[in-house]
Image (cartoon, rainbow, N blue to C red):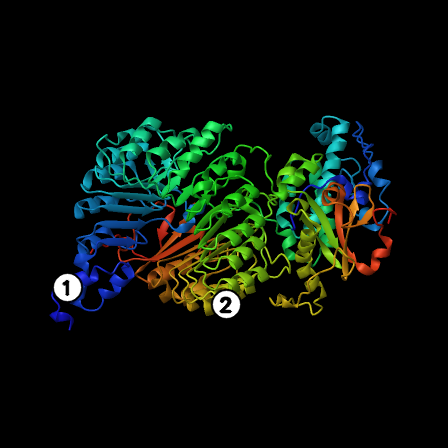
Amino acid sequence: MDGGYSRINEETHPQLLDLIPNERNWFVTRDGDHNIEGSKSHHGNGDEKKLELRLGPPGVEDWSVSDAQRSYKSPQKAAQKRYQIFKDLYFAVHACKQKQISCVSHMFSHFCTNLDSIYLFFIFFLYVSVSCFGETHQLLGAPAPVVGWPPIRSFRKNIASSSSKQAPVSDSQNGVVSNNIVEKGKLVENCQKGFFVKINMNGVPIGRKVDLNAYDTYEKLSVAVDQLFRGLLAAQNDTSGCGNNGNYQDEKPITGLLDGNGEYTLVYEDNEGDRMLVGDVPWHMFVSSVKRLRVIKTSEISNISRKDEKIKV
Amino acid sequence: MAYSFPEEVLEHVFSFLASQKDRNAVSLVCKTWYEMERWCRKRIFVGNCYAVNPRIMIRRFPEVKSVELKGKPHFADFNLVPEGWGGCVYPWIVEIARGYPWLEEIRLKRMVVTDESLELISKSFKNFKVLILSSCEGFSTDGLAAIAANCRNLRVLDLRECEVEELSGHWLSHFPDSFTSLESLNMACLSYEVSFSALERLVSRSSNLKTLRLNRNVPIEKLSILLQRAPQLVDFGTGAYSSEIRSDTYSSLAEAFSGCKKLKSLSGFWDVVPAYLPAVYSVCSQLTSLNLSYATTQSPDLSKILGQCHNLQRLVVLDYIEDTGLDTVAMSCKDLRELVVFPSDPFVADANVLLTEQGLVSVSEGCSKLQSVLYFCRQMSNSALISISKNRPNLTCFRCCILEPRAPDYLTFEPLDIGFGSIVENCKQLTRLSMSGLLTDRVFEYIGTHAKKLDMLSIAFAGDSDLGLHHVLSGCESLRKLEIRDCPFGDKALLANTSKLETMRSLWMSSCSVSFGACKLLGQKMPRLNVEVIDERENLDSIPEDAHVEKVYIYRTVSGQRPDMPDFVRTMGKDKDEVYNLS
């Protein structure tokens, strides 16, 4: 299910994050000459050009060096911090595109802690507004915390944080939990609460997320994917543009995702960047190597490799 | 003919009328019946303590044994009513102490109860039996000590979600050793440790004890002792349900639970350690009510318990239950009548908890007796709401709160008008509705058209214009309580429906577009309405008439303006002298 905004491992977005190599050469020098070569040199295509990162408003060449120096302890830390901000903002863009307004406001409050990042956010905000223009006016209505909302009594507000940390469930026989053993390498949080991977469907602009910990077989995953995208696909195909008016009987179930018989097939990208058909390897092996999922038209399958002949797509 | 019936016969017939509504109807038949009925009415419920004053009540009903009062408006629960607004019970206690010396029961909700009031209660009523305080505040453990010390025949002391100033834990020790009549004790909202030995002795000598809800401070190791002393318990609330896992603690707890053959209701479970949960398995199949809303444990543990609760009627749980847990509920709890799901982390955009609208749809499919829902979630769709309404046309209470204000249907990005419209159209017995998400005037048109039995409606961040409010006020025939916040509703709808307001208990509007001028006009036009503007800004007198009020609370009353208004509350449109008409 769509889990909204959450931090995903870097490898899921190889294209964008290549812009900022891990060996950064961003410096904050004394004479205010900010070297942001690392990012600029990679700004190739049109979209990324808009994301030109500068530490100052356009037309002002050097901007608050002292501010930057004050807020950062060291060049490495500064660069790390900017990298982090960049990554955060990337997710913010995605969040905006998925209409997750509240996480935009969450991001915004996070950024307002220093001037430098406010400006970076401003650039992104423009980018987001341009790319999302017309989709919804709510985009700019990110709400501040509201008095008395949500409507719950005060003593219920801090339950998650005030309770003591629970011991991880060690003796559960439930299939949901057993998958955690495979996920040892991931964050502890993911172990407890879910292993979300992005899933996109060709023809549907809105991506979703699935929690693979919630399933223990391919059949269940297939059912979940059908449920996730059935409505979206129907909405997408509704060319009259005025919605279904609540009549969702028109949706076709998405079947045959695993056996190649349906209109669509489920594929995945593994930890080596290869595209594979879902269903070939044992479930737990799949979960340990999957990085993202995709639902593509069965007719496009010839590009995809099977387990024994990996070809980079 | 009614006149030829001897009074004793009529009185006997009336004694079978329990509901206040029926008794009110009976008293309007003729003067004889009015007289008869007023002399034999034993219970009084006053939904708004400012709608009537205690002298009127005592004069009309001289033989009352049980009084129930409600004070602040519902939105006070969410901090929308400023401190000091009112709702103090003391003036009522003073009058009742004089008028009903044989009073046995007092039930108060959202009222300010001082230690003085509690002391007066404890000393004024010789046969006092039941004290239930719900969401009350203003008292300390000293007041509780007075109740414990002086009420020799007390049966019920129930503190539900109260805010108590805790000065010490000794209040419990004030129950004398000769005191054995206790049937129900709920101290779950307190946090101070009470003397365990005093508690144990109290439980041991109260052979009629049916309800015992402990506070968080009673450790899990001590639970088995209490359960062994009171195996007849019907309703039990644990304290903190955590400790290092020790097999002797576990086994004595499991044994103690299995000895409680009459146990029907469980709650508590603060700080729960999942390994201790199986101790309750032996009673699961007996349970009709289970409150796990403090149990921060994951879905698999919850599912294991719920899978055994085949007789469950009421479930309160956190969103940790997730859709999978609710699937279990749908399969196993076929007798479920009421479902409440609270959010574990309401202020985070994404709490990584897999609870969606699907969970509620599953329960609506699987539980055919489901009548009442309170559901907090992060996404909702029209299709889900429509499914729910078609699955469960017998719903009487539907409260759905999407955490993000004005969130649209997450699948289609449309407003949720048709979804909620479907709820009111299909659920013809619906008496209570709370809505959220993106809603236009259209949903109010549906409500006005279909929601004929709706008694209470809560609206937030919804609507486009006065038309929305007008639909509700003109269409909902049974509406008695309406509370609105942050909606673009203003003067036109209010002033067009003034007579409707007199048929309602109250109307609350905050952060809407109601002007001072309209409030004044309304107050002037309708002498039996109090139009109370709550506005904490300074220089209220110099604010122009067309400015919007912060909050307005409109309620019908037969006793005029209340005398206890703080400076940020004004009753509009009335003479200053027309205060608290006692005649």
Query: Which chain does tag 2 point to?
Result: B
Q: Residue at x 64, y 60 (%)?
A: B412
* Position in image of residue A292 (x %, y %): 75, 47
Instruction: Name the image quarter holding the C terminus of chain B.
Output: bottom left
Looking at the image, the residue that sits furthest to the bottom is B1
Residue A242 appears in view: yes
| Local SS, label 2 | helix
Task: Point out which mark residue B475 bears.
Answer: none
Q: Amino acid at mark 1?
A: Val
Seen in the image, is B333 located left or right of residue A44? left
Q: CA distance from mark 2 to mark 1?
A: 48 Å
Q: Does label 1 lie on the same chain as label 2?
A: yes
Judging by the rendered image, the residue that carries numbered circle 1 is: B9
Q: What residue is rendered at 28% in x and 54% in y? A: B45
Where residue A296 appears, as percent x and y from the top left, is 78, 56
| Residue at figure coordinates x 63%, y 55% from the top left | A138
- Judged left or right of residue B370, residue A89 is right
The residue under label 2 is B446
Could you tell me residue B443's position as x and y percent? 52, 64
Q: Can you give x and y, in whole percent of width and height, for residue A136 in the image?
A: 66, 57
- Figure check: A75 above or below B323: above
Quick one: label 2 or label 1, which is nearer the N terminus? Answer: 1
Question: Looking at the image, do the residues carrying marks 2 and 1 touch, with CB atoms under 8 Å apart?
Answer: no
> Element at badge 1?
helix
Characterize the local packing of mark 2: few (<14), some (14-19) or many (20 or more) Cα atoms within 10 angstroms: many
Q: Is residue A56 left or right of residue B126?
A: right
Q: Nearer the viewer, residue A71 or A146?
A: A146
